[in-house]
Image (cartoon, rainbow, N blue to C red):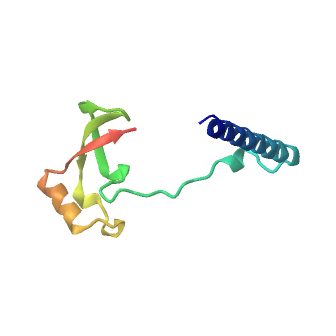
Amino acid sequence: MFHWSLFSRRRILSLRAKVVEEQLYKAKNGLETQQQRYFDMPRRDNEWEIERRFVGIDFMNRLGEGALGSVYLGRVLVKNIPHGKGRSIAELWELTNRNNSVAVKML
């Protein structure tokens, strides 16, 4: 038991030393700048997500609040959504049957 924990501790210290050494090397040679640390992830849209320009939000009618933000009542004009936006028949049918009412999550 003692031997294993000593081995693990040595391994952790060795890895930390390598990380510090790599950071110093990058800082010395200017290999990493603030802009290079971050990159844009590919955006994966939800198939049921509707663009903001096609939804009217009623900020006076708050439906609830969650961990990520508030939820408001929204209304969609199905006629305004272009067919080229990838809207399926099922989505348009669902919006029409629900009287164009949707929940809008504000992040």
Q: In this view, does 29 lie above or below 88?
A: above
Which quadrant of the figure has residue 12? top right
Residue at 87% over, 48% down: 29
Percent across and percent down for residue 54 are 32, 52
From this viewpoint, which residue is outermost toward the right? 28
76 displayed left or right of 25: left
Q: In the rendered image, which quarter contains the N terminus?
A: top right
Q: Looking at the image, which is closer to me, 23 or 90?
A: 23
Q: Where is residue 50 in the image (x, y as percent from the top left)?
A: 32, 54
* Along the line of sight, the residue nearer the viewer: 57 or 15: 15
Q: Say above or below: 60 vs 79.
A: above
Residue drawn at 18 percent across, 51 percent down: 100
Relative to 63, say whether 93 is above or below.
below
- Residue 57 placed where, x, y %? 29, 40
Query: In the depicted view, which residue is nearer to us: 47 or 85?
Result: 47
Who's the residue at 27% across and 36% down the image? Answer: 72
